[in-house]
Image: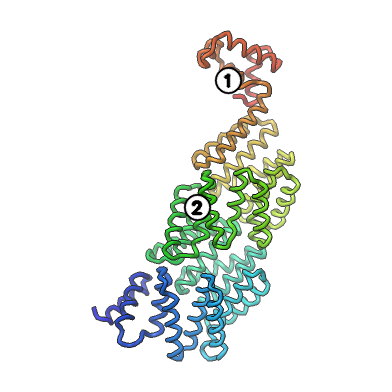
Amino acid sequence: MTSDDVLEHGLEAFARQRWREAFDALTEADAEADAEFGADLLDRLATAAILIGDESGIDTATRAHEAYLRAGDDAGAARTAVWIGMHLMDEHEIARAGGWIARAQRIVASGGDAESVGGLLLIPQALGALYGGDPSSALEILSQALELAERFDDHDAIALARMGIGQVEIAQGDSDAGFTLFDEVMVAVTAGELSPVPSGIAYCEVIGMCQIAFDFARAREWTVAFDRWCSAQPDMVAFSGQCQAQRAALFRLHGAWQEAARAATAALARLRRGDRDAAYGAWYEQGEIQRLRGEVEAAEESYRHASETGYPPEPGLALLRLAQGRARSAQSTLHEAMASADVANRRRLLPALIETELAMHDIASARRSVDELIAMTPSAPKPMLRAVVDGAEGAVLLEEGAAREALERLRRAWATWHELDVPYEAARCRVLAALACRALGDEASAAMEFDAARTAFAELGAAPDLARLDALARSIAHAAFGPLTAREVEVVRLVAAGKTNRAIASELYLSEKTVAHHLSNVFVKLGLASRAALTAYAYEHAIV
């Protein structure tokens, strides 16, 4: 195969998004070329390298930048400089990133065709303001970026600017406006209007913001699309680990915990192959599954790895602390994470704080937290957010002694979780609903709710929740059975089932005399005089 044939093969593979094949062929063509590779060819080679996780990507992009300069293509040189700067920012090489952005600024300031890169050039500055806690400045810069990008019909810059504006809107509490912009960006992505790297960035950012805003339906829809996009490019490493982490989150919510664990493992494998941006999501989702299964030490390790990326592993780590009986530590961790959180992220953390405050029996603080959560909830919230708010308010009302109002909220939350097919949260609502039913004297409904929750936890493999439920049942049983011993309770249950003293003795491996003695004690303790009265008592107090 001649060098021209190799080059043609590489370009065809690039067009078909066969990135490894494109990288190998273009690398070979570059090595065999009689003259220096053109800037546009080096640009493609750099893109392929970045997408397959090859470390040569930045060096090749640098060569492309220099080739653009030599060819007098200032726009190409500036654009490449901006992307190199953004890649280096993502890898936390701040000094080098700043140098490349400064170079791009100098080229754009020189005028000519380079002005067309002005919109893209403003994106790093805007992100710096946004993540630096200055959303107002970020919004102003992003609006300027969008205006410039639209003037020069720069699809990549238009998408990134709109996405940034959407992030600001959501962070400030206007989810509808933010997601309208996100949906517009995703239309451009799915229509193939964007280049590969901005497309991957859009998928990851939009799905992440959907999760923060409790927009379950939108997160699921775009995760499915993201999975298809990645599956169509099987040798792509960049973004693929992030896709697996998003799949893990979706599987976890749907109760498919084995599949979630496999997806988290796949995300970690992609992280090791080069998708460094997958680190937080991969480790956090693995920690979530381990926590829910009761694998405490493993979860602790996973959350530690997630925190090493610079993002707090909350609310997962706080809920792990709570399960360990370290409620005060959980509260402190959540307060620290919430101190610098925007509106959307604070809303995401509040339910865990409410759960922690209730575990500490600090009902007044839990009430303040749930009132804050309600206040920052839109008038027409997404179903998932509505379920979260109803469940949290129901839990607080129950502790406040308003069992009937609590039951109304909890059953409404359960219905929403059930409709969304989120079995774990639905089961947690049923536990609280059972307690509300019991407080209202409805023992039959309480027993039904407890049994349904136990079945769901067992099917999920939620060992800690099963253990807590069993401990709760023992506590309730002790309170309900009052003065009766465990053996006396067994005798009462068999009497209520219609068994004779002889049959009871046989089943419990006791003598008839001992059974009669137990029954005599029961009658005295409960102030009853007949087996019929004892049977009625057993059903009324949920002993059977």
Pick the front one: 333 or 406 = 333
Q: Mark 1 is on which residue type?
A: Glu
Sort mark 2 into few (<14), some (14-19) or many (20+) by Cα contacts within 10 Å.
Answer: many
Locate the C terminus by quadrant. top right
- Residue 412 at x, y percent in the picture: 63, 45
Residue drawn 37% across and 74% down?
A: 15
Q: Which residue is mark 1?
A: 490
- Callout 1: SS: helix
229 relative to 183 in the view: left or right: left
- Residue 405 at x, y percent in the picture: 71, 42
Pick the front one: 318 or 1 = 318
The quarter of the picture where residue 400 lies is top right
How many angstroms separate mark 1 from mark 2 (CA)? 43 Å
- Residue 194 at x, y percent in the picture: 47, 74
Q: Mark 2 is on which residue type?
A: Gln
Q: Which residue is mark 2?
A: 286
